[in-house]
Image (spheres, rainbow, N blue to C red):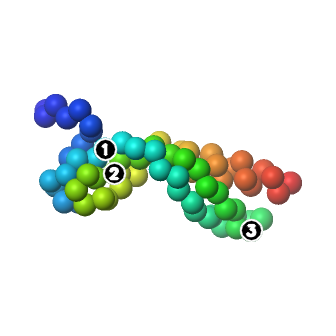
Amino acid sequence: MPNDENGDTCFFCKKGKFVTRTEEIAFHQWTDKGYVFCRIPVSIGVCDRCGSRNWNDETEALIDDAVRKEYDKFR
Ligand SMILES: [Zn+2]
């Protein structure tokens, strides 16, 4: 196993490395009460070469959580 300090080799360009950094992402998601719009800071891996994002389960969980909180405001 290679010993990478900053995580995995990019699986898109296979040359860069994913560097974890915090980015604010904005997104919206359709729910049965309408569109929910969220803007949250998440820590994601970004390739230092091609800029691809390594979207992981943790990121997904943060987004789900944010959507749920916004969704609750409709009640
Ligand atoms: Zn890359």
Q: CA distance from mark 2 to mark 1?
A: 5 Å
Of tags 3 and 2, the one toward the viewer is 2
Give the residue type at disc 3: Gly
Residue 41 in picture, x, y percent from top left: 54, 47
Q: Earlier in the sequence, mark 2 or mark 1?
A: 1
Check the image and name the residue furthest to the right: 75
Q: Secondary structure at mark 3?
A: strand
Circle 1 residue: 19
User: Is residue 13 found left or right of 23 in the rendered image?
Assistant: left
Residue 45 in picture, x, y percent from top left: 35, 47
Residue 54 in picture, x, y percent from top left: 35, 51
Query: Decide: marks 2, 1 in contact (CB < 8 A)?
Result: yes
Q: Secondary structure at mark 1?
A: strand
- Residue 62 visible? The answer is yes
For image coordinates 81% across by 52% down, the residue present is 73
For image coordinates 64% across by 57% down, the residue present is 38
Q: CA distance from mark 3 to mark 2?
A: 31 Å
For image coordinates 47% across by 50% down, the residue present is 23
Q: Secondary structure at mark 2?
A: strand
